[in-house]
Image (cartoon, helix red, strand yellow):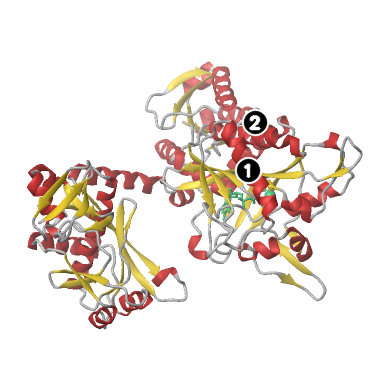
Amino acid sequence: MMQITFKDGNVKSFDEGMSPEEIAGAIAPGLKKKAVAAYVNDELYDLNRPIYQDAKLDIITKDNQEALEVLNHSTAHLMAQAVKRLYPDAKFGVGPAIKDGFYYDIATEHTITDDDLPKIENMMRRIVKEQESMMREEISQAEALARFKDDPYKRELIEELPEGEIISIYTQGEFVDLCRGGHIGNTRHIKHFKLLSVAGAYWRGDSDREMLQRIYGTAWFNKEALEHHLKVLEDRKERDHRKLGKELKIFMLDKRAGQGLPIWLPNGYTIRRTLEDYVYNLERKNGYLHLSTPVLGTKELYQISGHFDHYQDDMFPLMKDKDETFVLRPMSCPHHMIVYNSELRSYRDLPLRYAEIVTQHRYEASGALSGLERVRAMTLTDSHIFARKDQIKTEVLNAYRLILQVIKDLDLTIDYIELALRDKTKGKFHDDDKLWDEAEATLKQLLDEENIDYHEVKGEAAFYGPKIDIQVRTAMDHVITMSTVQLDFLLPERFDLTYIGKDGEKHRPVVIHRGLISTWERLMSILLEQYKGAFPTWLAPTQMRLIAVNQEAHGDFTQNLHEQFIDLGFRSSIDLREEKLGYKIREAQTQKIPYQLVIGDNEVKNNTLTYRRYGQKEQTTVSVQAFIDMINNEIKHKTKHAE
Ligand code: TSB
Ligand code: ZN
């Protein structure tokens, strides 16, 4: 007999060799039904893996968070077995559970397409019916290499394990897989799953290695949960900014223009200029001074700043001529340091808040590029605030509060605040411990004093100092950095920045780097997804579309109205094409224009307007002036409309 200690402290005896599933069944049939896997002495165990010794047992049930991961991971094995049956030459890379799903990387001569997925799903269902047990076996490295002699990917993984390590493999019917474990024990427990898509994936994420085929799928414990998830995925597809960006002509990418180098189309650029005006005004109100600096700098400038030593991986290759070497700038800070230094500064001049909407370039890995969310050419709502030490707290807080206001105006949702610190063991940070300790302690203290909740993350700081990053959750369920406030004691040293204090002596200012609302690129990706392309009136590239019922009878009135709207600063557009009325109305709808105005006899006779709001069925007739007041009011208050 063995003694099993449960989470609640209860101890019970069971026959040696019983599995978590059997133990659960012995306690209560209901528990057995809900059991998915277990922790045995804190090690993740398969549901059917025998326990031979006294142990601490914690059964993972369907209600636990890890359960879904175990199920999805098990489903990955099930899928691999089905793939192998259909395409016997298939070899396998890795097949982990991911958030809400799983994938498996596969090498086969057969090109797997979306059309193959139902076939694979059917085969999976067959294996479920066969009730294959997933049996664990522990073998030596040498034996593992022999067992997987035809599987180059698995061999590579086995060879990398530390010598002498015991390796676990799983047999499920005719199929054998290398795996650490944590399974649901038998394929019959896997009922509600769907294969979602196929994509290419480099072996080990390395673009110099071969490309494998990756199948994504998802598995759930009941039909409703699966259906709900598929609905969520459908909605995400509709919201994907890459799709919407194309349909609504916001931006484009073209291989010839360059990867990660987006082109802003007229609609997108109009929104961007609207956001720019908004940011300029807000910053002016808050004491920022705007300036403009070049996209190129000398190599020397970036050597002084330290970017050259610590940030080169993220920079485009240098541009060299006979006597000069240029850097395509990844950041604007060095330029702003020079501006500070161009005059003698007194303590009375501080804080000095330089702001710039900065175009900069970063040589992001091609695999990391994604639509507008991560790009190589980007324009940042940047600022560098030069302050005395006694001003740090107020300036950081002012910057933080301004960020909160913009986030609110744009309707974004903060997921969490991250305090990004240095990781001493990594070389990408400057190495003056004293400066780091002081900067990190200052930010920590400030957040604590203000009762701002935050997560600390080591290794995510900038090379010059710690950051407070504002993390936003997108409609696609990515968490992404939008805004940032960074405390920097390094660049003031590097550029020998000084001001004359009250005492008549020279002192060092500090620099606060502030990204207000990320880059226009990233912001646009987020706004597109959030509004599903239906921008509120203040942001919409076209705010109203005017359509005359009959060109001859109503054309002049419509044209006059259009010009009047333009003079008022509205982004009005008029559809004069010789198309059917119904066609014009439908098109205005697919473009998600907030207001469609159809102008006919009544409007001309009564000097009124009949409008229909995007997404609504009813039409409303008002006086021209009432319409103008309504639009002005919406713009002023950044009114959002329900979809
Ligand atoms: C705030 N020197 C500071 C600046 O003064 C700086 O550049 N900080 S940063 O490196 O954190 O970048 C600022 C913001 O740019 C990030 O918070 C992020 O929102 C955005 N950003 C960074 N890289 C990319 C990228 N590849 N594509 C789109 N946006 C990006
Ligand atoms: Zn900066």
Instruction: Using the rendered view, name the quadrant where residue 281 is placed.
Output: top right
**Residue under pointer 1:** 441
Q: Residues within 10 Å of mark 2 (few under 14, many from 20)?
A: few
- Quick check: is the Cβ at mark 1 less than 8 Å away from ligand 1? no
The answer to whether residue 523 is seen in the rendering is no
Residue 1 position (above or below residue 451): below
Q: Residues within 10 Å of mark 1 (few under 14, many from 20)?
A: few
Residue 516, horizontal then vertical, whole percent: 62, 41
Q: Identify the residue at horizontal 78%, vertical 74% (top origin).
A: 321
Image disc number at residue 500: none
Q: Identify the residue at horizontal 58%, vertical 29% (top origin).
A: 556
- Residue type at the position of mark 2: Gly
- 458 vs 31, left or right, is right
Pick the front one: 578 or 72? 72
Mark 1 vs mark 2, CA separation in Å: 48 Å
Residue 625, horizontal then vertical, whole percent: 58, 18
Pick the front one: 14 or 200? 14
Residue 374, horizontal then vertical, whole percent: 53, 55
Choose the circle earlier in sequence order: 1 or 2. Answer: 1
SS assignment at label 2: loop
Residue 338 position (above or below residue 308): above
Q: Identify the residue at horizontal 56%, vertical 53% (top origin).
A: 460
Instruction: Check the picture and name the quadrant holding the C terminus.
Output: top left
**Residue under pointer 2:** 569
Q: Identify the residue at horizontal 49%, vertical 60% (top origin).
A: 368
- 376 vs 220, left or right, is right
